[in-house]
Image (spheres, rainbow, N blue to C red):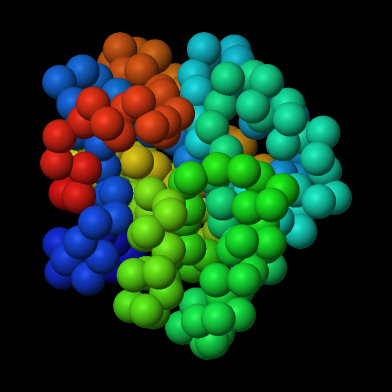
Amino acid sequence: MRFIGVPKMVRRMLPSAVWRIPNDDKVLHLTFDDGPSPRTHEILSVLEDYNAKATFFCVGQNAEKHPELVDLIRQSGHSIGNHSYSHLKGLKTRTKDYLEDVEKANALLKTTLFRPPYGKMTWKQYRALKQDYRIIMWTHLSYDFDAAMTEEIFYQRLFSKFQSGDILVLHDNLKYFDKSLKMLKEILEWTKKEGVECLAVSGWLLAKSKGTKS
């Protein structure tokens, strides 16, 4: 069975990473990995329709191709995060090369938020990056990239397990964009019905929140 949530054992491996941002309100943090893409504006349009804010963890190579979209994301009130320059697999990359790749991306993105591609990196990479970045992981993974995960199963698990401050991963990737966009619309319909506010991850929220390691 696919786990849309992250087992506690996994979370303990990265103790100072942010897996959710607990608070007393009804808040969901939408995040998008891999962009910007030529269709990013479609995500922004849907978010605007629902007055929702999100965080875009951008790949440096894509940001270099579409700098105007990085600017548009920020101008629309959303947050930018670093998702490395080349979308490297940390477990298969020398630490020196991995850190240089992240910094190459940050020369373009200028952010203190980082999410490792594939959600994996070595302990040495983690210890180095946490000195300069808030490492933002997730509470729920949408599996929008996996045809075996139907939207219905995902919605059922997400909506039944939701807690305020949860962080959800979707993707801004042309390979599975249509499924991602469909899921986004359904999620936003649910948040609207339930009175859940969608907020971008920000330094202010992280500072205000208690227990962001959980």
Residue 206 % position (x, y): 30, 34
Look at the picture and state if 51 lies above or below 162: above
Hey, which residue is sitting farthest front in the picture? 131
| Above or below, 10 relative to 156 | below
Quadrant showing the N terminus? bottom left
How far across and how far down the image is residue 53, in percent? 50, 23
Q: Using the rendered view, name the quadrant where residue 81 is placed.
A: top right
Q: Position of residue 67 (x, y in %)?
A: 81, 40
Q: Quadrant of residue 79?
A: top right
Task: Name the residue located 43 percent from the left edge and 52 percent from the top edge.
Answer: 133
Q: Is residue 115 above or below residue 74?
A: below
Confirm whether residue 64 shows in the render: yes
User: In the picture provided, is 15 more to the left or to the right than 131?
Assistant: left
Expressed as whole percent of the image width and height from the top left, the position of residue 25 reads 21, 18
Residue at the location (40% across, 23% down)?
198
Residue closest to the eye, 135 or 175: 135
- 13 displayed left or right of 110: left
**Residue 184 seen in this snapshot:** no
Q: How many marks?
A: 0
**Residue 75 horizontal side relative to residue 155, left or right:** right
Q: Nearer the viewer, residue 81 or 192?
A: 81
The residue positioned 39% from the left and 14% from the top of the image is 192
Q: Is residue 162 left or right of residue 54?
A: left
Please name the residue shown 26% across and 42% down the image: 20
User: In front: 84, or 175?
Assistant: 84
